Amino acid sequence: MGFPMDFTRCGQVVDHASQFVTCLDPELSEVLASSGAARRFGTDGRFGRLSTEGFSAIDDQLERWVGIQGMARIVKALAQGLEVHQDRVKKRWEKMMEMMMEV
């Protein structure tokens, strides 16, 4: 288990890591689409820039994907079948959990 960058608060997933990934490879897009871990993001005109002049949608033709129930699901889906080693992070995560349990 790695160090999570998302957590649940008041019944909502709070993700304080990457907010989306950009995909340029059609094969990776297909993997993301079929994984059930991600959905396309920003294709409805609600992704853009907000300035003093107002909102302007970004239409740069890039595919953006957001994790369903947090971005960690994308990584977990892509890592299926792989042996992943994260000892340093795992130890830090376990230490943090131990400290939380003591409180």
Image (tube, rainbow, N blue to C red):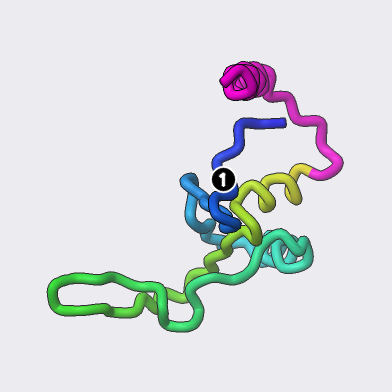
Image position of 76 with respect to 55: above or below: above
Q: Nearer the viewer, residue 89 or 8?
A: 8
Q: Main secondary structure of the magenta part?
A: helix
Q: Is residue 83 above or below residue 7?
A: above
Say whether residue 59 is left or right of residue 81: left
Say above or below: 80 vs 10: above
For the point 76% across and 42% down, the residue is: 79
Q: Position of residue 4 (x, y in %)?
A: 60, 37
Residue at point 71%, 59% (across, down): 37
- Which residue corresponds to the image point at 61% horizontal and 17% vertical from the top-left? 102
Region rendered in magenta: 80-103
Label 1, residues with CA under 10 Å away: few <14, some 14-19, many ≥20: some
Q: Is residue 47 magenta?
A: no
**Nearer the observer, 70 or 41:** 70
Q: Is residue 82 magenta?
A: yes
Which image quarter: residue 55? bottom left
Find the residue positioned furthest to the left: 52
User: Residue 18: horizontal and vertical position, in percent?
Assistant: 49, 49
Tell me what residue is drawn at x 54 percent, y 50 percent.
9
Position of residue 85 relative to residue 51, above or below, is above
Viewport quadrant of the N terminus: top right
Residue most toward the right?
81
Image quadrant containing the C terminus: top right
Tag 1, which secondary structure?
strand
Direction from residue 31 to residue 72 in the image, left or right? left
Q: Position of residue 14 (x, y in %)?
A: 52, 52
Q: Camera-side residue: 84 or 52?
A: 52
Tell me which amino acid carries mark 1: Asp
| Residue receiving disc 1 | 6
Residue farthest along the bottom direction in this orientation: 44
- Count of numbered circles in the view: 1
